[in-house]
Image (cartoon, helix red, strand yellow):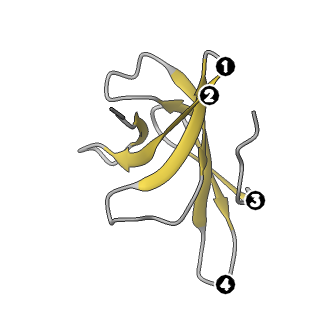
Amino acid sequence: MSGQKYRADIKDLQPDGATLWFARWMGGPTLSKINNCCLNMAGAMRRTVYITGEADTFFSIPAVCTIAGCRVKGYVTSDDEGFLYFQHGYYA
């Protein structure tokens, strides 16, 4: 699956092993995808997460990833140490 919406120009490494990719544009670098991203605070699963839109709040950025062939929507946020991770959305 390639849910990538923004280009990935700049590569940066996060201390937990995730690779952050940013798009370079006039307004400065913008997060576009994360390789080897933790899928929750426990950090048991890691996947590639694609950013799907502009940040809707100061704390979260809409994103999507694939788990067992299914597209899972959620958001990217940070923990207390500043590491970015993906949190899936709950729907009723």
| Dot 3: element | loop
- Please name the residue shown 62% across and 28% down the image: 66
| Dot 1: element | loop
The 10 Å Cα crowd at callout 2, few under 14, some 14 to 19, many 20 or more, is: some
Q: Which residue is mark 4?
A: 26
- How far apart are labels 3 and 1 at the CA level? 23 Å
Question: x%, y% of residue 7?
Answer: 75, 59
In this rendering, is residue 57 above or below 47? below
- How far apart are labels 4 and 1 at the CA level? 36 Å
Q: Are marks 3 and 1 in contact (CB under 8 Å)?
A: no
In this rendering, is residue 13 above or below 36? below
Q: Which residue is mark 1?
A: 69
Label 2 is placed on what type of residue?
A: Thr
Label 3 is placed on what type of residue?
A: Arg
Mark closest to the chain's N terminus, 4 or 1: 4
> Which disc number belongs to residue 12?
none
- Please name the residue shown 52% across and 66% down the image: 54
Question: x%, y% of residue 77?
Answer: 37, 48
- How far apart are labels 2 and 1 at the CA level? 6 Å
Q: Are marks 2 and 1 in contact (CB under 8 Å)?
A: yes
- The quarter of the image holding the N terminus is top right
Label 4 is placed on what type of residue?
A: Met
